[in-house]
Image (cartoon, rainbow, N blue to C red):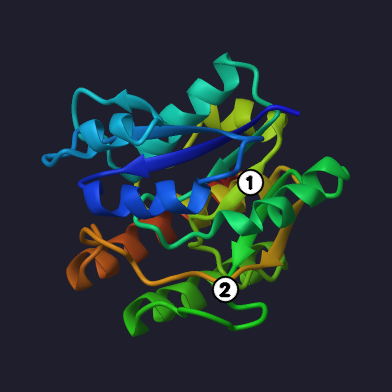
Amino acid sequence: MKVLVIVPAFNEEEGLVRVAEQFHGINDVDVVIINDCSKDTTSDVGRRLGFNVIDLPCNLGIGGAVQTGYKYAYENGYDIAIQVDGDGQHNPAYIKDLILPIKEGRADLVIGSRYLKKEGFQSTLLRRIGINYFSYLIYLLQKKRITDPTSGFRACNRRVIELFSTRYPNDYPEPESIVYLLRNNYKTEEVPVVMNERFGGESSINSFKSIYYMIKVTLAIVIDNMRKIGLT
């Protein structure tokens, strides 16, 4: 099976060095860096490290960058696509665990969760509040417990690649995309992973943006879920 690793990157010149170190010796996957119009040398660093790099002409945000990766995966015939952050938090040693449920046909989307075993870096307090909130919201709407709904470390099969290549949320896209898949009867699983602290760069989500995104994504999730019961 053809496997592609999608790495969205905005000002991640430091983090990509860590990513390259982590992927050293892993030969059975392809890696593409989606450079989201970075202001630093992310593009040059990515190429120097031997990655395929797609340079976006303007900053699209995390949703647009990741969707670009899915378009690339779909158009180039990949069977599995894996999201990996460009800041070095995600350990590729867990890739085999992420893709196993897909290979066995048990899941369409597999999420790497740091909260199933609660090992390693557990994120900031503000982020954990948001994670718990979205976990409860998803359970309330879909009766499915997702412990790490904002995890950017996840894998999907060809069906989801095709869907995400044409339809993917813009801001804080992980919780919204999970709800969409669940309400359309796609199979979703979580597997335990250990994540590291951010290696370099800065997170694009600060305190103000976190509150804004929570409100915005909540409205998007609720409206999307209403379509299932015919209210919109």
Answer whether residue 230 is visible to the viewer in this image: no
Q: Which quadrant of the figure has residue 82? A: top right
Q: Which quadrant of the figure has residue 207? A: bottom left
Locate residue 117, reporting x and y percent: 66, 81
Marks 2 and 1 in Cβ contact (< 8 Å): no
- Residue positioned 48% across, 37% down in the render: 168
Query: The N terminus appears in which quarter of the rendering?
Result: top right
56 and 150: which is toward the camera: 56
Answer whether residue 165 is visible to the viewer in this image: yes
Q: Is residue 118 above or below residue 152?
A: below
Q: Looking at the picture, which amino acid does disc 2 mark?
A: Arg
Q: Is residue 211 above or below residue 94?
A: below
Is 142 placed left or right of 131 in the picture? right
Q: Which residue is mark 1?
A: 155
Q: Is residue 73 above or below residue 203?
A: above
How packed is label 1: few (under 14 Cα within 10 Å), some, or many (20 or more)?
many
- Mark 1 element type: strand
Locate residue 75, reporting x and y percent: 56, 15
Query: The C terminus appears in which quarter of the rendering?
Result: top right
Q: Looking at the picture, which amino acid does disc 1 mark?
A: Ala
Locate residue 173, reporting x and y percent: 44, 49
- Mark 2 element type: loop
Q: Which residue is mark 2?
A: 114
